[in-house]
Amino acid sequence: MKKITKLSFILICCLITVLSTAGFAQAQTGKMAYTVSFPEPASNGLHVKLQTSGWQQDTLNFKMPKWMPGYYQIMDYADEIVSISAEDSKGEKLTLDKINENTWQITGVKNKAFTLNYDIKTSKQFVANSYVDAEHAYLINASTFFYVDGFINIPVAVKVEMNEAWSKIATGLTLVKGKTNEFTAPDFDILYDCPILIGNMEELPSFEVGGKLHRFVGYKLGDFDHEGFMQKLKLMVESAVAIIGDIPYKEYTFIGIGPGRGGIEHLNNTTVSFDGNRLNSDAAMNGVLNFLAHEYFHHYNVKRIRPFELGPFDYDQGSKTNLLWVSEGLSVYYEYLVIKRAGLASVETLFEDFENNINVVENNPGKKYQSLVQSSYNTWKDGPFGTQGEEKGKTISYYQKGPVVGLLLDFAIRNATKNEKSLDDVMQYVYYRYYKELGRGFTDAEFEQTCETVAGAPLTEIFEYIYTTKPLDYDKYLGMAGLKLEANPAESDPEKKVYKLKQIENPTELQKEIFQSWIGE
């Protein structure tokens, strides 16, 4: 052992003191505690109070996100702030300067406690917007809570001051032990991943899968067979879990925000527009189950199996990626298969689901102008279903072409491996390799390489369908599963065609094996 001199000992002690002080300072940085209240909910407003302290910086920039992960459009949430002010612990007003459309700057706050108070006026009932009325409140946290620029990774606390007429809160946030209305999140990414629904809500009968509790809580759920519906939902969850083979959350909640359109996925919950009064036909039930399967499968595909660009998130500019055809398109693909494999849909219904997408893709002139990766990257300006303005007819949707290419990709892998491997194996690999093992997203090249590794063969043509506008060879790839695509002129428009999936006569043994395993029979 090397002898330590007196000078060395003093230097070591000084270093330990400096490191300890730095660690203490870091631990003291950025205590953030929010309180949300609803003084006049009928006027569609809410009030937010942020109490914060422990900052080692003299100047802080408070930013409201411009969008929320899961909905890839700039939303400009800061526009709904109607008043904002700051004061110190003595009640003295502090100067708060708005330096751009979503950033407020405050100075002179080093080692000081201070409070931000602001009011938000909500105006639109949509799954990606906060909305408050006399009966309930739905909070998109990315449109409700500021983060401090450069400090997205610090813990945050949220307290909800309940309106007297409201009784329940539904959220994926962690409840403070012994409290009913106080929550915590380890960082702002998790905070923004957990919307909050408040009001007089109904809870459907819960169920367990793999020892994990699954709940359905919602506002204005409607009149329908609760028990029967939740039995179907359990079969759906079991079917989805069987694809990946792992349940990564402690508890999962389906949060119904009321009648409307849209759903957004999260790590341990999903918020969905839901109206049980409309579950009055097999077609309506299939549509709702597909929708819920899509949002549920997202907790794997995009929240954990994620493109490299989707985390850390850029809450200012948006996180642009070429891979929404995987995150969204393949989630559409799997929503159909999950429901079929759960025994909740027939082969005919499965065919109809794919036919709907094929008909849109093949009758859209945009297929000649825009590729799947371009559709993914350009969603920030085109929208998820393509531009409907001046560029109408020159864009496509990854929601529609994505599942169609996923179908061909799956059959190519099954055929190349004599039905020993499938797209399921690809999804399993990227889940366990990139999410579980490496703790990161995957790149375009890594996803393509994974597909080819699983197939044990090049998939050049399939990926040309993704990166270019090359026409899809349905005969070649559908034939691998003993299927074909028939096309007939549309009665309403002779320039368009109606496409139908059919099984071929006298399929080979391999074709029969691929088809049966694909549908889960």
Image: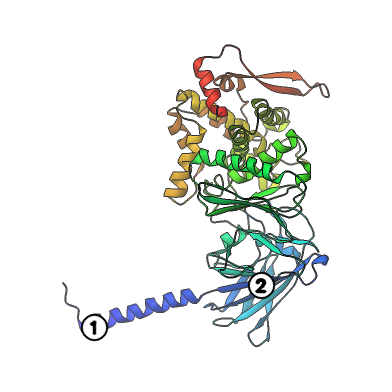
Across and down, in percent, residue 69 comes to 62, 53
Say if residue 448 shows up in the picture: no
The C terminus is located in which quarter? top right
Q: Nearer the viewer, mark 2 or mark 1?
A: 2
Q: Is residue 233 shown above or below 111?
A: above
Cα–Cα span, label 2 and label 1: 52 Å
- The residue closer to the viewer here, 209 or 493, is 209
Q: Give the secondary structure at mark 2.
A: strand
Name which residue lies at 27% across and 83% down.
10
Mark 1 Cα-neighbour bin, 10 Å: few <14, some 14–19, many ≥20:
few
**Residue bearing the label numbered 1:** 7
Position of 35 with respect to 177 (left or right) is: right
- The quarter of the picture where residue 504 lies is top right
Q: Are marks 2 and 1 in contact (CB under 8 Å)?
A: no
**Residue bearing the label numbered 2:** 35
Sequence-first disc among 2 and 1:
1
Across and down, in percent, residue 469 comes to 63, 30
Could you tell me the amino acid type at mark 1?
Leu
Q: Is residue 174 shown above or below 203?
A: below
Name the residue furthest top.
506
Q: Give the secondary structure at mark 1.
A: helix
- The residue closer to the viewer here, 476 or 426, is 426
Across and down, in percent, residue 116 comes to 67, 76
- The quarter of the picture where residue 382 lies is top right
- The quarter of the picture where residue 408 lies is top right
- Please, which colouring scheme is shown? rainbow
User: In the rendering, which numbered label is found on residue 369?
Assistant: none
Could you tell me the amino acid type at mark 2?
Thr
Total numbered labels:
2
